[in-house]
Amino acid sequence: MKLLASAALFALAAGLSVPAAAQQAPVESTGQFPMTPQGAADFVAALEADMFAFSVEAGQVQWVNETYITEDTDAMAARIGAIGTEKAVKYALEAAKFRTIPGLDPELARKLDIVRNGIVLPAPTTTGAAEELSTIATDLKSQYGKGKGTLGGQPVNGSDIEAEMGNMAHTPAEFVEMWASWHDNVGAPMKQDYARLATLANEGAQELGFADAGTMWRSNYDMDPKEFAAMTERLWQEMKPLYVALHTYVRTKLNEKYGDAVQAKTGPIRADLLGNMWAQEWGNIYPLVAPPGSGDLGYDIGDLLKEKGRGPMDMVKIGEGFYSSLGFEELPATFWTRSQFEKPADREVVCHASAWDIDNKDDLRIKMCIKVNSGDFVTIHHELGHNYYQRAYKEQPFLYLNGANDGFHEAIGDFVALSITPEYLVQIGLMERDQVPSADKDIGLLLRQALDKVAFLPFGLLVDKWRWGVFDGSIPPEKYNQAWVDLKREYQGIVPPVERPADAFDPGAKFHIPGNTPYMRYFLARILQFQFYQAACKQAGWKGPLHRCSFYGDEKVGEKLNAMLEMGASKPWPDALEAFTGSREISGKALVEYFAPLKKWLDEQNKGKTKGW
């Protein structure tokens, strides 16, 4: 889910972040700020003041564009994005110069690195490049927002077709139609523009001293870019056996459901059969793969909400209540009047869930097209995690108004959502005590979680591996789609349900590609959330199975959590991780421990089956 936070200002160069005060000219360092430590400090102070102001107007413009898509709001967003890009690139170039000055204060050096490294899509300084890059980025995002697939030959918008992909009443032929029409209609037209966008971003990154834009992205994690890439692959290998076991089991169940002609007993899984347009999370097919007997959990959160007459606003109130129970103050009144909770009937909007901090202080919002179901209930807890993080670090200097790394920002709401256990549902009055599944249902509970949490891991990794290849030239435009298909097969064991045409651009059918949102944050977040969750449960004194822990109502956990959140980006991420978990290394061990009972069960089910693809 996309995050729009003030310090993501340098992601402004992607045309997707939050700017403002368009009439202000960028601070000039030449002549105004001498190349001395004090000159560097004065430059950073002026930059922070300028960009703090700029972030407010641009946030408002971007909000209007995403909640009221027209040619005019597209043009407004493109203009403000171009101004933001020019500012961000100019500041980054100047920061790169100041960074070479000896004797810089460590905090000042950190801020200069944030300015230099933090642009998502840097435009080159050639005349018109910033405008061109911003226009392309805005157009791609709007194309996605207005995109439609078909079902039964009738057009279906993005949020609705996502929901229909999770409806197991459809036939394989209908799944194929939805999958192929969405990828063809939404993705394919973007290919040429995306190739141009990548070229411009690379040129901008090279001006900043990076080999390419992908290297620049990987430089934003307090470690060497090559070491970061190696760390992500190591983390995947640590968790891959669990994924392979899940894949093998699910493939068997799909074969039993649809037969050899639709899904073979061996090899990869057909992408459209997993209940999700991108096969990134498989929770919607749980009824098809549930363990006999223990698989019936006895409840569905969406059904529980409907039985209680709870609507979208009620779901958000419940989410707020979780954070309040940890001791966090209630959301501001403006949150409730300015957020978009449901899809308007009279206009096009970007339904993809996102969290916003417009004024860097208290103008917090979420933007969703909420449906009363389990997935959106979890998403609400996730998006609010962004908002509470944003408010926690609001007293930091502008350049530190962000997460310790982007994975942290995603992980906060995710780890809170892990606490959406049956016990929590009882505590908030959605479930009766006698409805709580007994211990013999644990495999079902864990399998249901794994279909989202574990199934996502390889997809979370491959999206940016694809983009890194695009940026470094190892994946040229003529191989864009084949490389995407190959990576999905290699990491996910997933293949398209139909032959892909030569001009296909399937990556464009995933929001974060045209939206230019780096995706590694979601991979890291899937891992970090279990580290955070394990730490919170230990702090709460939980003694039972980890997957049944809920720290709802524990203000001591909230106090320690807030101490980490307040740090923002002021310290390297290992410092923030250590503050809450006691560890300085990201590790998949907590995730593996959480799912250990399931892994044992899956291995028993998979005896005699061909593993992998």
Image: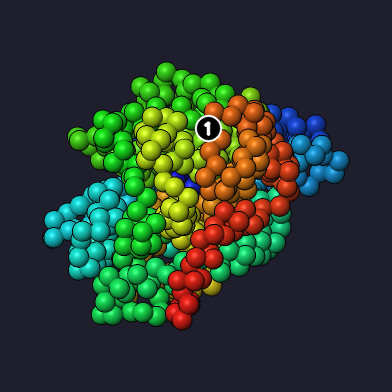
Q: Quadrant of the C terminus?
A: bottom left
Position above or below: 66 against 525: above
SS class, disc 1: loop
Label 1 crowd (10 A; few <14 / some 14-19 / many >=20) = many
The percent coordinates of residue 504 (x first, y second) are 32, 69
Q: Nearer the viewer, residue 493 or 61?
A: 493
Q: Position of 289 compared to 402: left or right?
A: left
Position above or below: 519 against 504: above
Position above or below: 319 against 172: above
Q: Residue at x 47, y 37 (%)?
A: 423
The percent coordinates of residue 485 (x first, y second) are 41, 72
The percent coordinates of residue 60 (x first, y second) are 41, 29
Image quadrant where residue 497 sits: bottom left
Please indicate, yes or no, whether residue 428 appears anywhere in the rendered image: yes
Q: Residue at x 42, y 55 (%)?
A: 444
The percent coordinates of residue 525 (x first, y second) are 55, 49
Q: How is the image coloured?
A: rainbow
Q: Nearer the viewer, residue 114 or 573?
A: 573
Image quadrant where residue 589 sits: bottom right
Q: Residue at x 55, y 42 (%)?
A: 549
Please indicate, yes or no, whether residue 129 appears anywhere in the rendered image: no
Q: Quadrant of the N terminus?
A: top left
Q: Residue at x 28, y 41 (%)?
A: 303
Q: Which residue is mark 1?
A: 552
Q: Amino acid at mark 1?
A: Tyr
Q: Residue furthest left?
A: 153
Q: Nearer the viewer, residue 391 or 436?
A: 436
Q: Position of 390 compared to 610: left or right?
A: right
Q: Nearer the viewer, residue 11 or 548?
A: 548
